[in-house]
Image: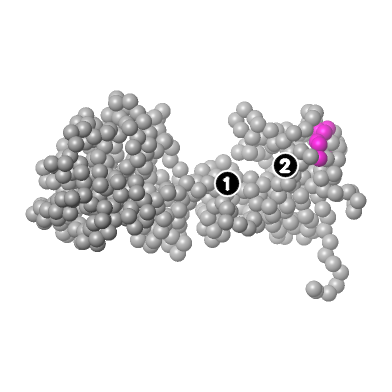
Amino acid sequence: MSGGERHTVPVDVHLIAVREGEKGPEVLLSRRAGTVYAAGHWHFPSGHVDGPFEDVVTALVRETYEETGLVVDPDDVRAAVTVHHRAPAGSARVGFFFEVRRWSGTPDVREPKVCDAMGWFAFDALPEPMVAYCRAGLEAYRAGVPVALHFQEPGDPIGHDPAVDRLRLVPAPGPDEPGPGREVREFAERAVGRITAWTDVSWAREESRVWRARGAEGGTWYVKIHQNDRFHRREVAALRGWVHGIGPAAPRLVAADAQLRAVVLTAVGGRSLHGATYASEQQRHIFHRIGQLAAAIHTSAPPRPAASTLPLGKLERHLNGARPHLAAGDEEFIRTTAEKAAGLPAPDVVPTHGDFQYRNLRWDEAADVLYVIDFERSEEGPAIRDFARLSDAWHGRPDLLAAVTDGYGRPFTPDEEAQLTVLSVLDAVSGISYGAAHDDPELVERGRRALARLRPHNAPEHHQAYVRGAAR
């Protein structure tokens, strides 16, 4: 313990009164007036604890009535966040911010000498100027942390200024803490400003992590941590390069950090095609859009001659992992297909998405826009590569294949059809091997089903269409 007098600070209380407005939640704010600190600035109804015999909840109930006329039952007071604050002049205090959603009465100005206006404001339409201390408490409350620090520096403005952001969030312990770790949070907030809500939207099968981040000013972004350096390099290279050539159909890269393997991306609209159900006419329209999008990807850079034929280097490793789950005759079919691939001409290479499938495609029905996301498997390759994970959908549905090729601008060549079979077989074997190693029976079954379809004597006459919403 250090010597000298103990440090003491004032204790104040702040009312975060929240109601549901026409466009979402709204918060009650009052504007300070007269000779008080920060006159002309908006602030929560607030005040000081009146001495050692008044607790903070009692103080809140009292100050709320004195300033607004609202009557609050102490049992309806909920802890929101505690903020340790230092003003630009150097004085410090501790503020207890409380959420209240039930009260009686209608708020109005009860102390006109120190308050000249009062009103309800949406969280994404807050008034200006607003006291920086109050705004820090509101953002910490929206972030869901129990404690925050707001130590301003000499010369900082009294009013909130996004360029002078002193708020530091202190999260609660525990395995259920939302959002990524501190370094990634700080990286994301340097790129887009204060983030008040994190939602984990990671795909269950992938080791890369993705969060939807909502900003204090109302924006939405996606923050992604790649599972390895290779995926990070691929996605960043695609987003900085050929993705610009497909226009608004993809997110934009806001920031990237190679050491963290993290990116911040703009949000795109629409609904994932994975598991969605549409009528036949809508299916054909969507597949036409898929063909158009694939064409935009493949023509976003000039084609180049390939250095080698189709990729077969990992076949033996994948076969070893998949072998216990193969049906009789599958391995012979796989090896025969690989042997035939050696005789195919080497296709030109173009930019490819690499994971062009339903879960990475989003359709905005109202705007009639198809979006594509997730470029961590993007690399140069044969154009037909991007159809391997979609070809199952048009089996037994020639109308969907016709819609795809019509949107693509041409039918597949005989060589491309042969390459598609090879790539589909390789993808099936890889999926079975990965699914077996990662305890994913759905992925194993998808690969087995693809092999059954691709083997001519085993292929069923009809295949469930994309409209069934089967997970593939």
Q: Are discs 1 and 2 less than 8 Å apart at CB? A: no
Q: Which residues are magenta?
A: 67-74
Q: Quadrant of residue 288?
A: top left
Residue at the (86%, 69%) spot, across then down: 5
* Quadrant in the picture for the C terminus: top left
Secondary structure beneath dot 2 equals: strand
* Mark positioned earlier in the residue sequence (1 or 2): 2
Q: Position of residue 66 (x, y in %)?
A: 86, 37
C-alpha span from label 1 to label 2: 17 Å
At label 1, the amino acid type is Ala
Residue under circle 1? Answer: 197
- Residue 87 is situated, as x and y percent measured from the top left of the image, at 75, 56
Residue type for callout 2: Glu
| Residue highlighted by disc 2 | 99
Where residue 169 sits, quadrant-wise, is bottom right
Where is residue 355? Give x, y as percent. 31, 48
Residue 140 is left or right of residue 365, and the answer is right
Q: Is residue 359 a member of the stretch shown in magenta?
A: no
**Observer-nearest of 260 and 256:** 260
Identify the disc placed on residue 102.
none
Whether residue 166 is visible: no
Q: Main secondary structure of the magenta part?
A: loop
* Residue 389 location, quadrant: top left
Above-or-below relation of 127 to 182: above
Near mark 1 (Cα within 10 A), the count class, few <14, some 14-19 or many ≥20, is: some
Seen from the viewer's position, the closer of residues 36 and 209 is: 209
Q: Is residue 77 left or right of residue 162?
A: right
Residue lying at the far left of the rendered structure: 343
